[in-house]
Amino acid sequence: MTAPDADVIVVGLGVHGSAAARQLAQRGLSVVGLDRFGSRPDALDHSRGSSHGRTRMIRRAYPNPVWNDLVDRAFRGWADLEAESGQTLIHRTGGMFAHRGDSTLQGPGVRVVERDEAAKLMPSLRMPDGFHGMFDPAAGVLEAERGIAAMRAGAIAAGADLRTGVEVTGWRAEGDIAIVETPRGEIRASRLVLAGGAFLGELVPALASIIEPWRILTATVRPGQSAGQAPGLGVFSIDLPEGLLFGIPDVEGNGLKVGMDIAEPWDPERPPAPVTPSEARRLLDRMAEHVPGIDTSDVDAVSCLYTMTEDKRFIVGALDGAPHVIVASACSGHGFKFGPAIGETIADLCQGVARPDLDFISTSRRGL
Ligand SMILES: Cc1cc2nc3c(=O)[nH]c(=O)nc-3n(C[C@H](O)[C@H](O)[C@H](O)COP(=O)(O)OP(=O)(O)OC[C@H]3O[C@@H](n4cnc5c(N)ncnc54)[C@H](O)[C@@H]3O)c2cc1C
């Protein structure tokens, strides 16, 4: 039998594959990381997945305490990455999450606030009548692009071989070895990590009926507008009847960004269709309604991909019958913040460290 080319092959170098490559390489394993899109190993420079763009939201507020430990690991992981890279990756702004009726959101420091207090904490945000807020003082803005570059730099410095523009066209398990097929030939390793985002259903057909790629729209307005800036505005969401409106304030010239979780199933092989003027208008009207005073005349509206599961929980773990093949889909529009924690989890699973604490997002809960 031919010797493997690496200890681990990571397929997909979005936030989760990049985080896994860094963790694995820093633990001394030899790693080959592959991504079908992009042209630079040291930065994410394509928009066909879900991890591109300047910013993401991070928060401790989650709808069930089962998430709390993973959230904690994520915050610690970003702090480690900040120390390693010497960069600020989280801007703490506080978060206001508005609901009508009862909310299940909880987490350390998270509390209910009524409209008067919400208006004091975030004067630029207008909640609809009849809504109340859950306030999360630890929430903030993640420097997403910088974070991925820092993960990739850490991986490369520890010896990982990251290759972009290389599509994995198939994979198979042969005994204890996993083999991936690419147009440039086969690569063999003792462990295989499949972190293909919206394309995961193509790599693992058993997942295709469980994860649904969606087209999602965001709009970012001209930076430097006080109505859209922290501290008057933090990260926020408003649970509107037509879908969840979310917003990320301008903290360092990134410009206020809003988006809406509205289901539009999409074939990931087709680049998401550009935002039409009427789609942009709908989103901007919502922004103007809930962040009054913002000038929406100069806007960058883009479309991208979510990978949704029915219960919005992730799918992470070994495949049944192929324990050396690990899938990692941390998705459903809220997975980015968990990047460092998912990287750590993937590295543990590759090294045979059991993670029963993560049964709530494991492959076994779905019988895969
Ligand atoms: C508009 C938007 C806003 C969001 N906001 C937030 C937020 O505020 N907070 C938060 O925590 N999360 C947020 N998310 C979710 C978060 O960004 C995603 O959960 C996360 O980026 C998913 O990362 P990933 O690595 O799993 O997938 P991806 O980033 O899609 O990476 C998968 C990679 O796999 C590659 N690939 C696929 N198939 C193959 C193949 N056959 N061969 C080689 N490579 C392959 C792709 O090219 C891609 O680069 C948001 C997502 C979007 C789209």
Image (spheres, rainbow, N blue to C red):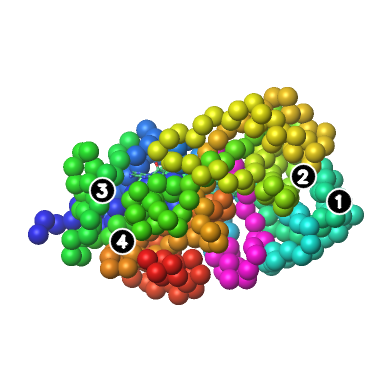
First of labels 4, 2 by sequence position: 2
First of labels 4, 3 by sequence position: 3
Q: Residue at x 78, y 35 (%)?
A: 288
Q: Residue at x 64, y 41 (%)?
A: 259
- Residue 300: give x, y in percent of width and height: 62, 29
Residue that mark 1 sits on: 129
Location of the N terminus (image quadrant): bottom left
Residue that mark 3 sits on: 170
Q: Which residues are magenta?
A: 53-72
Tell me if residue 63 is in the magenta stretch.
yes
Look at the numbered disc 4 and give the secondary structure of its residue. strand
First of labels 1, 3 by sequence position: 1
Q: Please name the amino acid that badge 2 sits on.
A: Leu
Nearer mark to the viewer, of 3 and 2: 3
Residue that mark 4 sits on: 325
Regarding residue 84, the answer to whether it shows in the image is no
Question: Eyeballing the image, is 313 above or below 236?
Answer: below
Q: Is mark 1 within 8 Å of ligand 1?
A: no
Measured in 3D between alpha carbons, the distance from the residue under mark 1 to the one under mark 3, in whole angstroms, is: 52 Å
Q: Residue at x 69, y 24 (%)?
A: 298
Measured in 3D between alpha carbons, the distance from the residue under mark 4 to the one under mark 3, in whole angstroms, is: 13 Å
Look at the numbered disc 1 and give the secondary structure of its residue. loop
